[in-house]
Image (cartoon, helix red, strand yellow):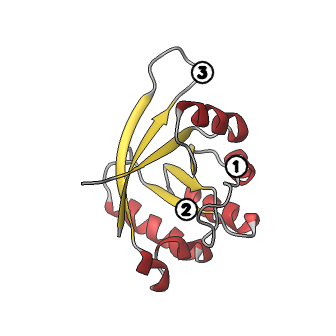
Amino acid sequence: CVPFQHKVIFCSEESHDPIEGKYQTISFIWAMAEGYGACLINKPELVQDMVRHVRNRIDNPRFSVSIKIRIHEDLKKTVDLCKKAEATGVSWITVHGRNTEERHQPVHYDAIKVIKESMHIPVVANGDIKSLKDAENVHRLTGADGKIKHILLSN
């Protein structure tokens, strides 16, 4: 497995400090072979059921539930998954702008923009953001509410 630490920064048009949050994910290569992880992009009803189950188990409605996805080759399917997740109670969605087969290819920021324009909840952009300048460019291209910069953890 490959652990990544992600830094999420939410900014607004207001003149106050950005809000920062951190979370950690671990990418397991075997997950896709077992039908987990990015493979769930092909199972929107299952994602919706999973979100519903988590929401139903949490008493605090202010508790944040989020998902992180890659894009489907058919962007309409990605938007459908996002809308189903939103309708079921996801607080925000992180979108890695590549499909499951892409690793180092250019990020599809245009796809993130379409997703952002289709949602009523925050959308966080992920993929090839290595600097503040990159984050500003991604914001300009996508309108995303947040951006994730990842750092490979090392010993």
Counting residues from the N terminus, which is met first, the one under dot 2 or under dot 1? 2
Mark pair 1, 3: CA separation? 21 Å
Q: Nearer the viewer, mark 1 or mark 3?
A: 1
The percent position of residue 52, horizontal first and vertical second, equals 45, 66
- The residue identified by callout 3 is 13
The dot on residue 69 is 2
Q: Residue furthest front?
A: 155
Q: Answer with left or right where residue 15 lies relative to residue 28.
A: right
Asked if the residues shown at circle 1 and circle 3 are in contact, with their CB atoms under 8 angstroms apart, the answer is no
Q: Tag 3 or tag 1, which sits nearer the N-term?
A: 3
Work out whether 28 lies above or below 23. below
| Amino acid type shown at disc 1 | Tyr
Residue 70 lies in quadrant:
bottom right
Please name the amino acid that badge 3 sits on.
Glu
Figure quadrant of residue 121: top right
Residue indicated by mark 1: 109
User: In what element is the residue under mark 2?
Assistant: strand
Residue at left 68%, top 55%? 106
| Mark 2 neighbour density, 10 Å: few (under 14) some (14–19) many (20 or more) | many
Q: Is residue 127 left or right of residue 140?
A: left
